[in-house]
Amino acid sequence: MSGPPLAAAEVAASGGEERVAVASQLQLTWWRFKKHRVALASGIVVIFFYLVAILADFLAVTDPHATDARRSYVPPQAIHWFDEDGSFRPHVYALKGKRDPRTFRLAYAPDPSEKRYLVLFARGYSYSFLGLFGTDRHLLGVHDGRPEESLFLLGTDQLGRDVWSRLMWGTRTSLFIGLVGVGLSLFLGVLLGGLSGLYGGVVDTLIQRLIEILRSVPTIPLWMGLAAALPASWSVTRVYFAITVIISLIGWTELARVVRGRFLSLREEDFVIAAELAGASRMRIIFRHMVPSFLSHIIAAISLALPAMIISETTLSFLGLGLRPPAISWGVLLQDAQNIQSLGIAPWLLLPAIPVIGVILAFNFLGDGLRDAADPYG
Amino acid sequence: MAAYLARRLLLALVTIWAISVVTFVIIQLPPGDFVDAYIANLSASGSMVSAQEAEALRVLYGLDQPIWVQYLKWAARVVRGDFGMSMEWGRPVTEVLGDRLWLTVLVSLLAILVTWGLALPIGIYSAVRQYSLADYVFTFVGFVGIAVPSFLVALVVMYFGFTLFGANIGGLFSKEFELAPWSWAKVRDLLGHLPIPVLILALAGTAQLIRVMRANLLDELGKPYVVTARARGLPEHRVILKYPVRAALNPFASTIGYLFPFVVSGSIVISLVMSLPTVGPLLLRALVAQDMFLAGTIILLLGVLTVLGTLISDLVLMWIDPRVRAGIQG
């Protein structure tokens, strides 16, 4: 579709022919990518999500593991931005619990007579900021009062844990499990795809058949089998690691396909043959000449593989076969929303679905834009 | 053509063998065997099992032999159609599975038919009317279909069914038919319950196929032969349907091979959320209880059915694509 005319337009747009002539593949990709508005916006959304993941402790208002049986299923609070006199003083109403005389369920209602003013950089529970230094500052807190008792931005779950704070932590887990998983898939994909494309022949046939076999097996039952095989006695970290490995064991095939295709088409290129004739070693040809020219393709493939990883983790954890409590991930959070009865009582438990959908959409748009941009010459 | 067929058949056989080995290994992975789980179960309820009894149980189930002997014994019986006993249920696996396997197949096949039925016309429309309002709407719906995990769609639909209509829309049968023998009334009841899970299951695949079909057709529409056909005065629907659509169908058909495993995987998850009486919930339970013959059989049968589905889609591809028929590798 985007043939030579577009590439020529590219030349004109990015300022001077000389610049294009000496630009690296990554630079060309970036110039073209910048024009894709939706993809660019999605890239910013993705960066925003990863910032949330890094700053999860700071953004959380209470300890996400702290339970409080008296405050189970507190509905999300509304933030009131202005005081009665019209001055800008964000506050929430204190919650008063009242027992329903018929059902004996504790119902919470805001009490307008008692206001809790919100403050920035408030003191809360202590944590270690990025593992560098200990602090107890959080983005949001309440003036004279403990956030545990008065601030429920997204309500609480059955055990009285703050859904907002848990969501921040879940974002961290789910996004980083995706990154680690993609890292592993990338390693397998580049290694096997590279071998396949580079050597051809029997190696290629074997690896291609392996990929075909892996892709023709329904993955969920397989994952379930592997995940169920993890001993219940394993620590949270070990389970986390094992789940990542399981997810990437099947996720590498698409990356391998991309890498192999690139290797096959580049092998015949003039500059590769020229390098060969000039006596460059095989390693030098691969890493100095071939890899830079398909790096942008790999980046595009990665940004399309990440959302798949995140969906996998979320689905497995949702089924109860992935990460297990006390680990917090999006899937673990959504597991609370699994049965319709608890959803009927506390529909806000479904809120973690929104960031899941948001980040996957953003990654898809970003990946699409990158894939288009990865071919600056059409 | 014969060579192509032979190659496909051989690959299918190798895949089935690989699935059988992998599933068997998976079942063997957890520490401890069924007898350990069984004993733990019994002692939880207060009764004790002596070491001799445990040993006798192991011999009875062949658990005392090396693992490859266990595999070969199992494989030999499977080939004869004997899938062994479900140790947890104390009944033959085939009996425990009952209608569940066929309901899984039914739901998955219907979902694939719906996927095709929706993706084909929508894809063509989106390509022919590129950048129209409907194209944008379908593209957006397509992205949502890809981005939202199927279990979330199922959850949200269940939630709204519950809050808006006060109805539990899970399951495939009404209460009175759940255990009833098959009858016309039961079939009618099943048909009434099928559309929602099938549509949810078809959503993600449809979204992907629409994009594939649209992109393929857009590539074809710009080609000179389309201009020629139009110049010679063919009616527009013939111009589009007769040549470019047919050419665009090739990559479309080859992705069906990946649609099968995708849909079967999805059906497991959706079944768990919507409590459909398919093999999904049974598999989860069997895995947790380490009921190895039952879990193994389910994973194996799902894998085999998927491979068969893929094989059939390859045959369809051969039927559509003259190049494959002529034995030319495209």
Image (cartoon, rainbow, N blue to C red):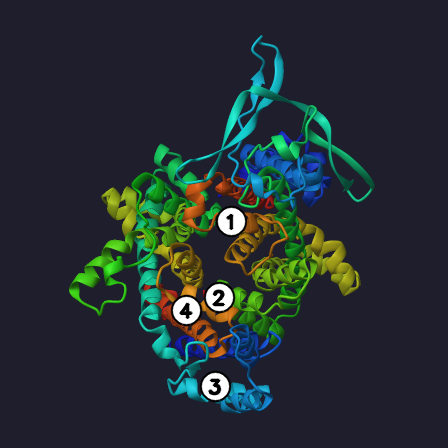
Is label 3 on the same chain as label 4? yes
Tell me the number on the disc at residue B35.
none
Is label 2 on the same chain as label 4? no
Q: Secondary structure at mark 1?
A: loop
Question: Which amino acid, mark 1?
Answer: Asp
Name the residue beneath numbered marker 2.
A221
Q: Nearer the viewer, mark 1 or mark 4?
A: 1
Is label 3 on the same chain as label 2? no
Answer left or right for B113 relative to B6. left
Is label 1 on the same chain as label 3? no
Question: Which amino acid, mark 4?
Answer: Thr
Tell me the number on the disc at residue B74.
3
Tell me the number on the disc at residue B306.
4
The percent coordinates of residue B146 (x first, y second) are 46, 48
Number of other residues with Cα within 10 Å of mark 1, as a class: few under 14, some 14 to 19, many 20 or more: some
The percent coordinates of residue A295 (x first, y second) are 67, 50
The percent coordinates of residue B115 (x first, y second) are 34, 54
Is label 1 on the same chain as label 4? no
Answer left or right for B315 relative to B21. left
Q: Looking at the image, can residue B216 be seen?
A: no
Number of other residues with Cα within 10 Å of mark 3, as a class: few under 14, some 14 to 19, many 20 or more: some
Q: Secondary structure at mark 3?
A: helix
Q: Spatial distance from mark 3 to mark 4, Cα to Cα?
A: 21 Å
Q: Spatial distance from mark 2 to mark 4, Cα to Cα?
A: 12 Å
Answer left or right for A376 relative to B57. right
Name the residue beneath numbered marker 1.
A336
Q: Nearer the viewer, mark 2 or mark 1?
A: 1
Question: Which amino acid, mark 3?
Answer: Trp
Q: In which image quadrant can residue B65 be found?
A: bottom right
Q: Nearer the viewer, residue B196 or A282?
A: B196
